[in-house]
Image (cartoon, helix red, strand yellow):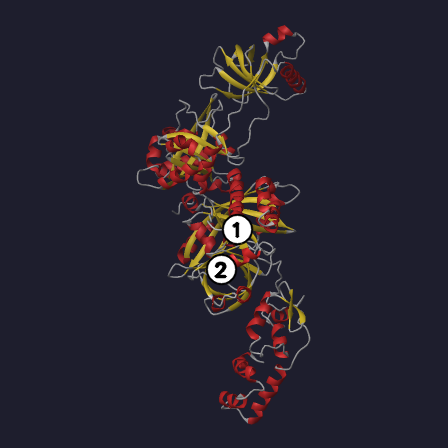
Amino acid sequence: MKDHDKALYDQLLPLHEKDGFDELLNKLTPNETNPQRLLIKIEIRHLMSPCGKPVDLRGKVAGNCRPYFLHGANHWMDDVAINLYHRRVDIYQGQMTLGLFEELHHTPNSYRVLQREGGEVKTTESLDTLDAVPLRFGHYLSRSENRIQISSRIQAFLSDGTEVNGSTVDISHSGMQVKLPASFHYEVGASLVVYFPQLGDECHLPELFSGLEYCIVGKELNASGDTFQRLRLRLMSSTDAIGEVIEQKTQKGAQDIRRENEDKFLSYRTRAYEQVFLEQTPSLPLFFCEGDLRYSLLTEQNRAIWDYWHDERNLPVIDKLFSPKRLQHLAMDGLSSSETLIYCFSHQHGDKTFFFSACATELDQDLRHLFWHVGSSRASWRVLRVTMARINDEDNRRLQEAAPAYIQQIDELTHIATVQDLTLETATPDFRLAIKPKTPTKTLNRFVHTRDPIVKVEAVSSALLPQRKEPRYQHRTRTTLVHHQSGELQGKTIDFSSHGLNLELNKPFTGSKLEQVSVTFDDLKRVDPNAPLGNVPYKVVQISEDRTNVKLALLKNRNSQQRSHYLQRLIEHNQHRLMVDSERLPPPPLLRAMHQMLLTRLAATPYFIVRRGETLQVSAIGANYPSDELSRLLHKSAASGMMSLAPVLGEHLSKYINGVTRQRNRLTQVKQEFYLAATCTTEGNIVDINARPLESFDTPEERKLFIAQARERGKFFAVRNWVQPLEDGEKWLSPKKLESLMHLSSQRARQLEMEFADLCAYGEMTDITEEVLRRLEMG
């Protein structure tokens, strides 16, 4: 049967061997001769011949086949074929005929058809590994009604009239989750009409045969590669029929039905990914009360930014980055959010460290070129992006729910700033492309930070875990500290441990952090002259603002183990005399409030990578709504309701992520810069994206040409990709919470557990278009 004859045969086949067949044939073929009409009759007789052979598509189609008992025989068909069967069986008068048999073997995903048409033969393993359903960070589903889990056959008609066959997963009064074939396109927000023939028969409800209107509100990530798609639907029709179904099924107490709150799985999965982000992000969040910096939220990865802003005394000076003038610009009344680029470097003068910083808006052309030349030639050169947002009434309402006991501390907070380090070593020479001006270098002194006073900023660990490696004990005993510059200083211990020491000195200490000193425990040596506590080498960790308090760490050498063991035995034998100096952990409600503020203000696009066998795949992408321009670009390049990293990484996920996921010579992190040229229509719609990594350009001039051409044809984007390895992904799942989810659905709980067990990398994409254009002076 040829495609152009299909409409003719579809009208004739239902009337085969019935009255009116010849009349309809003559009417539909007025221009055909009798011999041609005879050939049509012969073809119809062939198509309508009974076929007792079972359909077995295993290994013949790009899809998973399942058994179906139809017409007295077992058949193996995939979702595409079973949907075709339900659509076409009535045309063949409800019988399995040769025509229907042949159609089922020639579906669009049949390997034979794909090879004949020169198409790519795809298997379920050739999934688009760069697409994922976005997770809305800081937003959680809540549902006031329980759902019952029930599998029942349904027929759904899409908005274009396409009929698809599937089954329910769970159902409630106002919505349900269904499984439909993945081979069809489902648009979030689109409506569809669903018929319930099986439930209609079982519950004797005629309304279920007439169809109910539903709206697609979400699509679930099909991580396992099955040929079905899970959809979340919201009921649009006004009806009591679904409520009656739930009541009848609940009363019968069928064993295949159990109550389930699907939102618990979705919310818990989102929260687990949020926890990964909160503990792994390289961005440094800062919390302000008007013009005063109060807290910094530290992670394993952003500690480098925090440590950078410490002077030679190891005291935090990051507050100096936010001068009153800059804060006035960043936290201007009426602005909900703002951002700026800040260029920084440090200069060592004698035994003191001086920090220089300048916003892009504070520099004219000569000053900018001078600042760039002087700063970028130093190892301390940094390019930071600071995003500041006001804490609004909506935040306060949510935070009151999250931490009612700490509402006073939360009420005092007015702004949250996110500091991102955009420095890339391979791009640093760009700052010296312009000719260095003859302006004296001392002109930059206007950008030096004041050294004092030191503002106490509380560093809060994003993970609510003890940060000390060992307990400290309060004890006062006399000591003598010797330093090559300060000489001999008398003091007393404040607290100590087997590897650390906190001293109060009678005179200021003139040294710097990381320098070596020797300490003698005078009183303890008198008690035991043979104790290895004389001239013990320590390394300076921190010096107070007035330099009379120093914190030290035992220097590692061949005798350090003997000394630490002696101190440990001393502690164990005097436990009754010593008081533990307890580590002060942040209140959990306050930490939750900080997390909530950060999650709703993403300064980058976080994503998560899983390894399944030898394949790397994006399992989730974090997002906020309304989204930024980069997120919108990633949305537009994927199927509806999904996001894709393809515009940036192309189809080479492994190539760019392999450095942090390989087993040997694994890198701790990878930074990459990508240039994107988006070709747009006159209406502004993106029709094509060309992405190139920074290293693919030979010269800065070649990059500038690429940018100029991109802006002519549409839009230019620059993206920084940062990725680092993850170990033991299951640690972000609470065993207690997972156990409670097992009672709802053991299968879903195991899928969640396996997903996090496969986690191998965490990454962030940041829109750095403005920074690149300024760096190349094309802004």
Q: For label 2, count other residues whose C-alpha is less than 10 Å away and answer few (under 14), some (14-19) or many (20+).
A: some
Q: Horizontally, is 438 left or right of 281 in the view?
A: left
Q: Measuring from the top left, give residue 363's x and y in whole percent.
A: 36, 37
290 or 28: nearer the viewer: 28
Spot occupied by residue 12 in the image (x, y as percentages of width and height): 54, 84
- Indicate the amino acid at tag 2: Glu
The residue furthest front is: 251
* Element type where label 1 sits in the image: helix
Which amino acid type is shown beneath numbered disc 1?
A: Glu
Q: Residue at x 53, y 38 (%)?
A: 279
- 535 in relation to 732, above or below: above
The residue under label 2 is 244
Using the rendered view, name the quadrant where residue 442 is placed: top left
List x then y, in percent, for residue 413: 38, 33
Q: Is residue 91 above or below residue 399?
A: below
Taking the spot 52% from the left edge, 51% from the top edge, the residue there is: 262
> CB under 8 Å between callouts 2 and 1?
no
> Which quarter of the rendered picture does the N terminus lie within?
bottom right
> In front here: 298 or 338?
298
User: Does dot 2 land on a helix, a strand or a loop?
Assistant: helix
According to the picture, the residue beneath numbered tag 1 turns out to be: 262
Q: Is residue 300 above or below residue 625?
A: above
Neighbourhood count class around disc 1 (C-alpha, 10 Å): few under 14, some 14–19, many 20 upward: many
Residue appearing at x 56%, y 90% in the figure: 37
